[in-house]
Amino acid sequence: MTGRKYTPLPGFGLTLGFTLFYLSAVVLIPLGALALRASELSPGEIWRLTTTERALAAFRLTFGASFLAALLNAVFGTLLAWVLTRYDFTGRRLLDALVDFPFALPTAVAGLTLATLFAPNGWLGSFLVPLGIHGAYSQLGVVIALTFTGLPFMVRTLQPVIGNLDAEVEEAAATLGASRGVTFRRVIAPLLFPPMLTGFALSFGRAIGEYGSVVFISGNLRGKTEIAPYLIVLRLEDYDYPGAMALAVVLLVISFTLLAVINLLERWASRFER
């Protein structure tokens, strides 16, 4: 027993085995099956099936809207996390609970609700449409839906970090004559940047695979407001399994590549914490 650290959980071998089994059953086996089926297609077939005008338009909208939604969440999610953590006001707990609402709400219900709100005769659409702002059945609607579903990832990632920030450091900076802008840029921003990248990555990854909330508000206009997951479903409904597999593989590869790049950026940004 000398030198061994006590742990309330079972031994390392058992826990590692369960971890690998669970990870394989949930993630690795499905991804392996997809890769195996996709290997039946030649590179030329994959290229032909994924470079059609309709497929390229779906990919552009999927990744473009996902990036924009994650960027919006990075800005406004940071502000929301700061207010919920640093200030005490009436209704704060209710507002904090509402942040998790997109987690609990079925995505189809969220999409239907957003479409109703931003429709030309909806509560918000009746005011926005006359101004030329079409929040439903447009690419803007896709961004709205993806922003709604990705917001909790940014807020919940930043709240613990903001709560652990030492207020005395900010007070010391102010005592030394630093303005609010300098304090934020030199003291707070370097500490928040790594978790912001993490929240951005989580929000971005969630948006890429989103389906339920988008299909109702986007209108699914061919070549205009179709997202890649919806196009995959259409291919499956038409029994075009090679086309669905090709789109899924490209979506998977691009997603993994982008997430790997973001993880590298997170490692680079973590140096600012030192």
Image (cartoon, grey):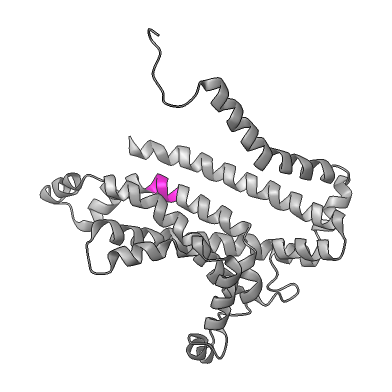
> From which residue to which does the magenta span run?
193-197
Q: Is residue 64 left or right of residue 1?
A: right
Residue at the top extreme of this rendering: 2
Q: Is residue 164 left or right of residue 19?
A: left
| Residue at 39% in and 17% down | 5
Q: Is residue 196 magenta?
A: yes
Of residue 86 and residue 185, the one placed in the foreground of this image is 86
Residue 134, image x and y in percent?
57, 83
Quadrant of residue 115 in the image?
bottom right
Is residue 48 in view from this perspective?
no
Residue 162, image x and y in percent?
30, 50
The C terminus - image quarter: top left
Of residue 206 and residue 20, the one placed in the foreground of this image is 20
The N terminus - image quarter: top left
Is residue 104 in view from this perspective?
yes
Q: Is residue 161 left or right of residue 169?
A: right
| Residue at 47% in and 42% down | 266
Of residue 60 and residue 113, the one placed in the foreground of this image is 113
Residue 212, image x and y in percent?
63, 66
Total count of labels: 0
| Residue at 52% in and 41% down | 263
Quick check: 270 above or below 91?
above
Residue 44, image x and y in percent?
88, 49
Residue at the left extreme of this rendering: 175
Q: Is residue 20 left or right of residue 183?
A: right
Q: Is residue 129 magenta?
A: no
| Residue at 39% in and 19% down | 6
**Magenta stretch secondary structure, dominant:** helix
